[in-house]
């Protein structure tokens, strides 16, 4: 999928999710690391800026790991021992944005399991916000498959073997997922 095609699909998605009559919304973005949650978040921000009438806040546990270096730049310093604190800070930021009346609060975290975003469901409910959960799919997979001799073996026992494109996409996802 080309970047412009991906951008077009994201814009159409955000138009559907964020268009009136809904005003106050918490959007939980969920997906594997590297799947495009931040890209989807950026598309939502562009959509809302073009619309020009709504405020937006983006909350992410990743923000906790950005620290200023000596030169005035922010650098990402992931520390797995601080993950609980990072998610607590993200929930606090979401709660603060809702209490300030921000129109759209995007929560950009992995949320592999439902319980991982239950706190945002509670925050939305307590603040009388609508909750939308957007599952972001990995988009590097090609839209059509080409059969080749190299992918002729498609099973080991009862388990299907991923085709070459899927193996390449999984390798790219693993590469993106190194802290």
Image: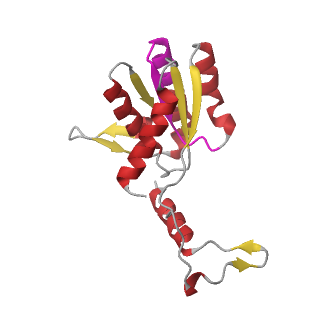
Q: Is residue 160 above or below residue 148?
A: above
Quadrant of the image for the N terminus? bottom left
| Residue at figure coordinates x 40%, y 51% from the top left | 5
Tell me if I can see residue 62 in this picture.
Answer: no
Residue 22: x, y in percent? 52, 19
| Residue at figure coordinates x 43%, y 35% from the top left | 64
* 95 or 103, nearer to the observer: 103
Compared across the picture, whether 64 is left or right of 25 comes to left
Residue 100: x, y in percent? 44, 12
What span is colored magenta in the figure? 92-112
Tell me if I can see residue 2 in this picture.
Answer: yes
Q: Is residue 91 above or below residue 62?
A: above
Disc tally is: 0
| Residue at figure coordinates x 43%, y 17% from the top left | 102
Magenta stretch: includes residue 97: yes
Q: Residue furthest bottom?
A: 149
Compared across the picture, whether 56 is left or right of 115 comes to left
Q: Residue furthest left?
A: 71
* 144 or 101, nearer to the observer: 144
Magenta stretch: includes residue 154: no
Residue 31: x, y in percent? 56, 46
* 151 or 95, nearer to the observer: 151
| Residue at figure coordinates x 59%, y 34% from the top left | 133
Q: Is residue 166 above or below residue 28?
A: below
Q: Is residue 22 above or below residue 164?
A: above
Residue 24: x, y in percent? 50, 17
* 57 or 83, nearer to the observer: 57
């Amino acid at each position: 999928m080309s970047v412009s095609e991906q951008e077009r699909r994201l814009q159409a998605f955000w138009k559907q999710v964020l268009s009136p009559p809904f005003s106050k919304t918490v959007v939980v973005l969920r997906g594997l690391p590297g799947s495009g949650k931040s890209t989807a978040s950026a598309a939502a921000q562009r959509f809302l800026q073009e619309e020009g009438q709504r405020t937006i806040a983006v909350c992410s546990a990743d923000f906790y790991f950005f620290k200023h270096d000596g030169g005035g730049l922010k650098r990402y310093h992931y520390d797995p021992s601080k993950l609980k604190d990072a998610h607590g800070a993200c929930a606090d930021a979401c709660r603060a944005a809702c209490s300030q009346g921000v129109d759209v609060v995007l929560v950009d975290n992995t949320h592999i399991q439902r319980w991982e975003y239950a706190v945002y469901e509670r925050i939305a409910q307590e603040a009388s916000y609508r909750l939308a959960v957007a599952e972001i799919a990995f988009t590097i997979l090609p839209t059509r498959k080409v059969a080749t001799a190299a992918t002729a073996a498609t099973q080991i026992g009862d388990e299907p073997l991923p085709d070459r494109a899927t193996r390449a996409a999984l390798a790219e996802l693993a590469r993106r997922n190194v802290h």
